[in-house]
Image: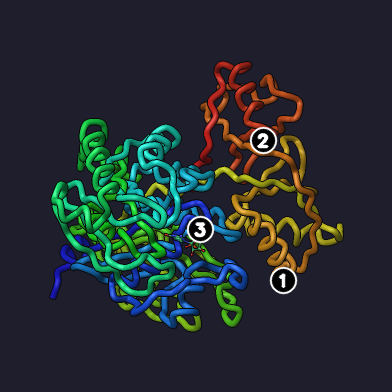
Amino acid sequence: MPSIADEISSRRTFAIISHPDAGKTTLTEKLLLYTGTIQSAGSVKGKSSAKHAVSDWMDIEKQRGISVTSSVLQFTYGGCCVNILDTPGHQDFSEDTYRTLMAADSAVMVIDGAKGVEAQTVKLFRVCALRGIPIFTFVNKLDRETRDPFELMEEIENVLGIGTCPMNWPIGNGKNFRGVFDRASRHVLAFEGDGRANASKKVNEIEAELGDPALDELIGAENHRNLMDDIELLDGAADEFDFDAVRAGKLSPVFFGSALTNFGVEPFLKDFLRLAPAPSAHTDALTGEPVEPETSAFSGFVFKIQANMDKNHRDRIAFVRICSGKFERGMDAWHMQGNRKIKLATGTAMMADDRATVDEAYAGDIVGLFDPGMFSIGDTVCSTSCRVQYAGIPTFAPEHFARVSQVDTLKRKQFVKGMEELAQEGAIQIFRELGAGMESVIVGVVGELQFEVLEQRLKSEYHVEVRRQPLGYTDIRWIANEPGQVDIKSLNLTRDTLRVEDMRGGKLLLFTSPWNVDWAFEHNPDLELSEFGNVT
Ligand code: GDP
């Protein structure tokens, strides 16, 4: 039987980040194919019919008849126990997507080779960078005409500010995409098959030495020549592979491939699992000491709370990332923020139709705990024998704002209660104009779907109808100065900049353009602004 330490060191817990349509779902599906989790792959979702309302994975689930939780997908491959965290990216992009990144030990960044680094990739990247986790890049869609790989790497470096180290190099692109050159072994992996879209089988690879005349036939003489030139250039110019820099999130290993045709997926998976970190220590905020995953008793933190996942059960599920030790169903635990003993009797993972019970889990894993309303995002649970408390989760800058007020003024109490409770739960963020009351509240969300969820839940749970007036703010910053260091009222700001306060009394500024943010900096030399709010 594997020991707890063996179990934990085999864990690879990561998130896949990308701009919508770069190929995250397709890549996830192909990873399932290669690991034997599913037997054949097809197009995961027909764009016309699929509404990405719950999770891209729900689509995989429906079409493939496999059970994946809506929050984490677990499988074993090559001695690793892999946890892929769900980071919804389409209409269901929300603050939860960012929070989920707090539970990952590394990230895979999927980039569309024709489009390069896109807006949502930048946002997600920055949250990963905040934590300093390793970020691996998969440049996708090489079966189409893509941009020059050198240019793509330069863009990643310039836009994201991370070094790049190509682990392999594409041979041709579009219809002419013939394989990849593996830089470590200095071998060519030529793909067999015609690269038809929707390839549903693993691709065969033929290995050959660079410079071997037989390669001319395998990949084409021109491709061969171009590859030799590229490799010479690359060896002289690209960053050297530096494992420590990768682990520190300063250098991103880059892989090229095509998730749709399966080309390059397997070499990526093998290298990724070899290089990606197992769970490492999290810091106990009470003592500043590291909590080692293998040697310590059970502990973890709540990174996401999901309400009403199932209409038949009006309860919430608190998703906990286990940071140390072993979780056992029914175990006694200590809820640090609640300062009381609780029984983790209902460790569940949500399946599509039913709840599957998780009996045991280890550091690196995610468990969904039944939550009658006692948990908040960022809370720590730990075994009764060890008291630790993790730092919590930052509040992420909302990107859409609206003024929300109740339609029926007699329902003011319910309105205020509903807004405060939903904000407490992390479903939305609420702001009050400095000096104003709660008659109308400014709501900020990361994804617009959160507005709809807010309206629906206020209606069904609090019986309040609301009016929503969109506001044109584009940028929000928390004032990061020590209390009393700046006088907010006398800040020199453009006229359309709004001074507001969050639920915890944090002071913020709402700007109508990035230009106004610069203006505030220029005219208030002492002002310090942050894109992340207080830790919860
Ligand atoms: P997501 O939004 O990032 O999850 O992207 P999807 O995996 O849903 O892919 C978006 C679209 O791009 C779908 O139509 C896919 O079939 C297509 N796609 C994904 N990967 C590739 C690829 O490697 N090559 C090509 N040509 N299309 C791809």
Can you say which quadrant of the picture contains the N terminus? Answer: bottom left
Color theme of the render: rainbow
Circle 2/circle 3 CB separation < 8 Å:
no
Residue count near mark 1 (Cα–Cα under 10 Å), binned few <14, some 14–19, many ≥20 = few
For the residues bearing labels 2 and 1, Cβ distance under 8 angstroms: no
Instruction: Give the residue drawn at x 30%, y 64%.
Output: 383
Q: Is mark 3 within 8 Å of ligand 1?
A: no
Closer to viewer: mark 2 or mark 3 = 2
Residue kind at label 2, given as amino acid type: Leu
Tell which of 403 and 485 is nearer to you.
Answer: 403
Q: Quote the CA–CA distance across marks 1 and 3.
A: 22 Å
Between tags 2 and 1, which lies in front? 2
**Sequence-first tag of 2 and 1:** 1
Point out which mark residue 510 bears.
Answer: 2
Q: Earlier in the sequence, mark 1 or mark 3?
A: 3
In the displayed structure, 371 sits above or below 472; it is: below
Q: Which residue is mark 3?
A: 376
Q: Is residue 506 left or right of residue 71?
A: right
**Whole-percent x, y for residue 357 in the image:** 38, 80
Q: Nearer the viewer, residue 106 or 242?
A: 242
Q: Earlier in the sequence, mark 2 or mark 3?
A: 3
Q: Residue at x 64, y 59 (%)?
A: 449
Within the image, what quadrant is residue 266 found in? bottom left
Q: CA distance from mark 2 to mark 3?
A: 26 Å
Q: Is residue 155 left or right of residue 248?
A: right
Q: Which mark is residue 460?
A: 1
Q: Is residue 460 above or below residue 508?
A: below
**Quarter assignment of residue 41:** bottom left
What residue lies at 75% left-to-right and 30% top-to-bottom? 496
